[in-house]
Amino acid sequence: MKQFTALYVALNETNKTTVKVEALARYFAAASDEDAAWALYFLTGRRLRLAVPTKRLRGWAIEQAGLSEWLFGECYDAVGDLSETIALVLPPPERKQDRSLAAWVERIQELQVAESARQRQIVTEAWLSLDETDRFVWNKLLLGGFRVGVSQQLVLRGLAQAYRVEASQLAERLMGQWQPSAEAFRALVSPDPSDTRPHLRPYPFCLAHPLEGDAASLGQLDHWMAEWKWDGIRAQLVRRDRRMALWSRGEENLTERFPELDPLIARIPDGTVLDGELLPWLDDAPLPFTSLQTRINRKALTRSILRRVPVVFLAYDLIESGGIDVRDRPFRWRRDELERLILSCAVPVLRISPRVTAASWQDLASLRRSSRARGAEGLVLKHADSVYAAGRVRGVWWKWKVEPWTVDAVLTAAQRGSGRRASLYTDYTFSVWDNGQLVPLAKAYSGLSDDEIRQVDAWIRRHMREKFGPVRTVDPELVFELAFEGIQRSTRHKSGLAVRFPRILRWRRDKTADQADSLDAVRAMLSAQTHSDPSSTTGSTIREGRLFER
Amino acid sequence: MECLIEVTDHGLYCAAGDFYIDPWRPVPRAIITHAHADHACRGCGRYLTTSDGLHVLRTRLGEAAVIDTLDYGRSIDVSGVRISLHPAGHLLGSAQIRLERQGRVEVVSGDYKTESDPTCQPFEPIRCHTFLTESTFGLPIYRWRPWSQEIEAINGWWQRNADEGFASVIFAYALGKAQRVLSGLNPAIGPIVTHGAVEALVRAYRATGVSLPPTRLASSWSRGDPALRRAIVLAPPSAQGSPWLNRFGAARTAFASGWMRIRGARRRRAVDRGFVVSDHADWPGLIGAIRATSAELILVTHGYAATLARWLNDQGQDARPLQTRYVGERPDDEVDEPEATLDDPPERDGP
């Protein structure tokens, strides 16, 4: 455990990729196969089933530490993380024991089948024999919140360095069900020369640059091809060697999460790679992104969720065809080939992202204004001759997003943040006026600089009013301009409205609370949105990366 | 039961003796618990501090301030109020203020810590009727490991950095914490370099008779001196991210603070390491100190005042939060930015 904790600490102490890879390589080279297998399991974001409800763990920690419930709550507020709070409030270990990582994982597995009294015994024994940092890491493994800010790619680079195996080969061997054990680990890192199957690796994604300013400055419209900017999960579908894999931009293998795409393996010819977007799609229109999010957060894909939130692959591009990398061919050519391919496949789960055509830049601009009503975030403009570049290359693809909605709202309550922001008041509630009263409209966490966060935090501490659990109401004085992507009616919110992806645009120091916007003004945005909105669906822009954070 | 101390808009006031303790605005007569900026306001008519605290307070307030001193444990009488100063263990010359009138004893703790610190007198528990305590780290998550372990960790970090050719920059409050860290550094590892703000107070400590390892002011080094690669640099938190640091070349950074016990605070600081170094009492320290006073009334100020008071209530003690303007040590702003600094002119480029 000590070694693994040391790795954890080392990964936490640096932002430098090379140092992280070094630390990972050192760990993998030194650890036993069994420990290395488990380390890999956790570091790549896999988790064990939660064996004990957090409420019970909390209760046992409170007992062991001899605290009252409320005081533990105060501690939790200050720390912002349950595993860490427990690690910090417990008394120092009575009898330190250093078992291997695998042995400590075994204890967690035992919990899953043990009865309550035995569970308690296992947990408290672990707590009292581990020191603070080990205890924290063990809690993280137990609670399934183990995150160290390394991507699977980085972990595999470390592993590759330790065992002199190619990282891409490791990635492929890791695909699918992977049970951590000493044998599995040895098989994973074995330099097997017979393993020459084509890799199912995706290409680096080509990303669009945000377009600021006038689209007409891009020149002649007929040099450009426009599509809607869809709001789903960007993905590549790789079909090679009679196998298929679906990859997210974060190079996460999504294949098993979208079983409705399985039939494609029989339809798409070998040696094909498609770039596209996974979109929740029902009755010929996209569903709001939040529905996809609820699906992704599910542990098990039930029949009902598959029925309620079916997904399609909306293809943007063809980047490998007949086993040949065609990224260097002009987009115009790739798009033609893509259209042909999709027609010949003829499966409803594989669609093409329709082209948006207009006679002039002006017409295109007015079409863009209907994006929200169509469930899109705006347009993407691709040069007809553009190659499929690796990464975000300027001038080839542009994303031309619709302006967000904005509103001036009053800060009315605040709560301490978690993680990096624990102990600072950084989670804000914003309100707008409704008949002389301030009604909460949105919570927002992001958008202020560290400096502003500090200033607002200091202000909040001087202007607190009431306390509701961890939430403090504050004097309604500060005004902030919020941006958000969409509005929906909601019965769960006091305002009757729910806004999507709210964030802080700027601190309006020039405004006083009475100059903030009214709920009526926000309602007017909603009706403006739905009037131009035949399918009454809206998009949202929760960032893709966030979805897969665990 | 009448308290000797009340909170006014100028600070803690003793009407019976007509003086203030740690006022936050200028007043005619102020008793100072310690020289941190939120406790030692400029512009008062007369100051009273401990003999140990004279040089430090002088560095902070300037030559013009009128400062009287009193030895620890000695007492004076002001209009029937007997005043004595007792070690608070917070930093050099820090004091708890004991007031006694007609058999009633009240103690204002100022900031204090109960841990050992070679640079100042250890905290002395005093029996009293009313105890006014701080609560900066008044949560059970705050528990310090023994100082010997923490300073060993700091020296270990320095040694590793030196071996790998990196300067070690440690950010610590210029008054108190920097000298405490300094006192435990092992000069055999490499040179100890100080920021002007730190050095000014190091000199005040030495002038008071505290022995500290040798230091050398950052501005006296020439840029790129290879010896700097083995150096440890003591700098105030405000130096973080400033061009002043460039002179040390490749460096690793650390922050010394009680808040470093929380992972979120460490990450927010954006330093390579966080060392849990506090000049305030941890939770067990606070509880122990309060118990030792046997006070019947506990007034809890700056920090987790409501929390600590409620916990004491749960234990059957009469405790109340008391609103003051002291800030103690905040995780994110620098309350204690010293004004006094030694000349540390911007470096000139070489010919």
Image: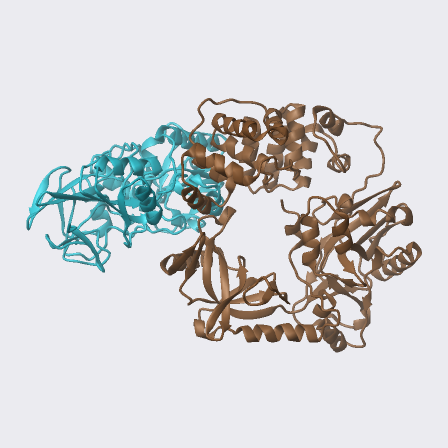
What colour do you see for chain B? cyan
Colour scheme employed for the rendering of this structure:
by chain
- What x and y, as percent, mark residue B331? 40, 48
Side (left or right) of A73 relative to A492: left
What colour do you see for chain A? brown
Side (left or right) of A396 relative to B121: right
Q: Quadrant where the N terminus of chain A lies?
A: top right
Viewer can see residue B222 = no
- What x and y, as percent, mark residue B226? 45, 36
Q: Give the residue displayed 86% in from the left and 60% down from the top.
A: A335
Q: Is residue A18 above or below residue A164?
A: below
Q: Quadrant of residue A8?
A: top right
Q: Give the residue displayed 66% in from the left and 38% down from the top.
A: A46
Side (left or right) of A420 relative to B258: right
- What x and y, as percent, mark residue A287? 73, 61
Q: Quadrant where the C terminus of chain A lies?
A: top right
Q: Quadrant of residue B190?
A: top left
Q: Is residue B335 above or below residue A83?
A: below
Q: Is residue A11 above or below residue A319?
A: above
Side (left or right) of A132 relative to A231: left
- Toward the viewer: A233 or A139? A139
For the image shown, how many numbered marks are present on the structure? 0
- Give the farthest residue toward the right: A344
Viewer can see residue A55 = yes
- What x and y, as percent, mark residue A66? 40, 34
